[in-house]
Amino acid sequence: MKRRVSTQVLIALSMVPLLAACTNDKDPAAVESIKKVEKFNVSGLPIVNEKISLTASILKAAHHGDFNDMEMVKRLEKLTNVHIKWDQIPAESIKERNNLMFASHELPDIFFAGLNSIEVVQYGSQGLLVPLNDLIDKYAPNIKKFLNENPNVKKAATTPDGKIYALPWVYNQPYFEYRNSFFLNQEWLKKLNLKAPTTTEELYTVLKAFKEKDPNGNGKADEIPLGMIYSNLNNSHHVLYGAFGVLEPTGSKLAVVDGKVRYEPVQPAYKEAITYFHRLYQEGLIDLEAFTQDQKKYNAKIANKDVALYGSFTSFNGGETGSNERLAQYIPIEPVAGPSGDRFWRRQDNRMQLNYFSISSSNKHPEISMRLADAMNEGELKYELHRGPFGTHLTKSADGKITEVAPPASESQAVFKGKVAPLNFIPLLFSSKEALNVVESAANDARNVAYETIYKDNIVPEKNTYPSTVYSTLEEADKLKVLDLDIDSYVSEMEVKWIVRGGIDEEWDNYIKEINSMGLKDKLKIHQGIYDRYMKN
């Protein structure tokens, strides 16, 4: 039987666009009217009693399936009564698409992963992104609680004008404090009757033996003592710079000492590290194709089907070896000490990533959108949105521990999960307790053990690390765009030149003069201001 619609309801419905627009102006009466029309629930699920649609853009990774077909997205809709019309944008198109959307003011209601920090500050200050502070306070108890219990997260998510325009993604797993382990071929060590090196000089001796004494036993001089891809952070040599006292050899190349920001490539320690790596390269102890090969070629060498070719390499978890059998040949070793006894291990803190949820000024339902983000962080639902549903992708033991189900032999874990869940592309907030409640895969468990027993005590202290999750003002970003590009490009060019050809002693003074002439003083002044503001928040 058809329902009879009253005149009052028709009038109310006709006013929805106008009232919704008023919501963005924080008109309390308008908010209350919308609640009545939509039957909006301030707490509990569903969020609205009658289904409503919101548009959203999201960065789509290669391992993602269609968001419209994901089981966990469908489950979220059923729980909340909020349907999402997805604009799924591949990484190679995201910058152009964002520029187009903001230039035309044709904005989705929600931005999930896909905006960068400059865009968030720029479009937030222009009013194209809605401040989330009050919405969090009123409509997001899960998020509010997390931010209150994790003030560093709240500080990082706050822009220079004191507002939050984007929620982060947080997975407070301790071993996310560092990026790479240094793997050494233990079978080669055993065959040559060598011990794992503890100093840079001992490492040199081991690498030289790997090159000269045929440890893979095939009668060929095909051993590559140190495998490397210069341009790939996972497989570069930069973690070893810490042995010479360099605190941050890549990324921003900035460190903090006694509260003062400094640039590592002009420090004497940096010069000493490059001199050491030139020695290795000159003697053929570093892969001679380290500066030219791509990932495919590197992986082919490390996973060579006949015998191992690499004596050592850096990696997130050793996955480049291609098989557990090959990986078993390698062990992560402790940081080696340099000439002055330094054993610093590079910190790359991935526990938090900025810009995973923003509400645009076109959104007529900001309170519903905020409640949706909060619902994503409800109980065990967040685990399922992150890793896939219980039963097919997750199991839970009697003690409450959560374990991932192994994927079919024909596909990777990432693809297995990415077919059914958004993964870490939405604003999921996991405390340390929640992260540690997951029983890790064998590879990640091994990484956790390496963190706890090998690297933890040597990771560069947080107080000496320039924060990677920090917003700058538009003026600061505009100036740094030029300064950073010019200076960092020159530094990388000279680093490669000196490792391959040498000459750092003769050219060092002119190198320092050139960097200073490019505006190093201005660069450090801006970064110092950003750092000081961040620490005061």
Image: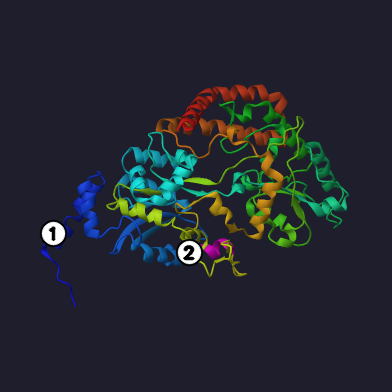
Image spot of residue 291 (x, y percent): 66, 43
Q: In which quarter of the image is the C terminus?
A: top left
Determine whether the residue tagged by mark 1 lies in a helix, strand or loop.
helix
Side of 492 where 467 appears, left or right: left
The correct choice, above or below, for 74 with respect to 334 in the image is below
Q: Which residue is located at x 60 percent, y 70 percent?
A: 408
Q: Pick whichever, 273 or 324, lies toward us.
A: 324
- Which amino acid type is shown beneath numbered disc 2? Gly
> Which residue is at the far bottom?
1
**Mark 2 or mark 1, which has the lower sequence index?**
1
Above or below residue 27? Residue 69 is below
Name the residue tied to disc 1. 11
Write down the quadrant of residue 247 in the picture. top right
Looking at the image, can residue 263 be seen? Answer: yes
* 93 lies left or right of 397: left
Given residues 459 and 123, the one toward you in this image is 459
**Residue 466's image quarter?**
top right
Bounds of the magenta segment: 412-419
Circle 2 sits on which residue?
65
Type of the residue with mark 1 = Ile
Q: How crowded is mark 1: few (under 14 residues within 10 Å), some or many (20 or more)?
A: few
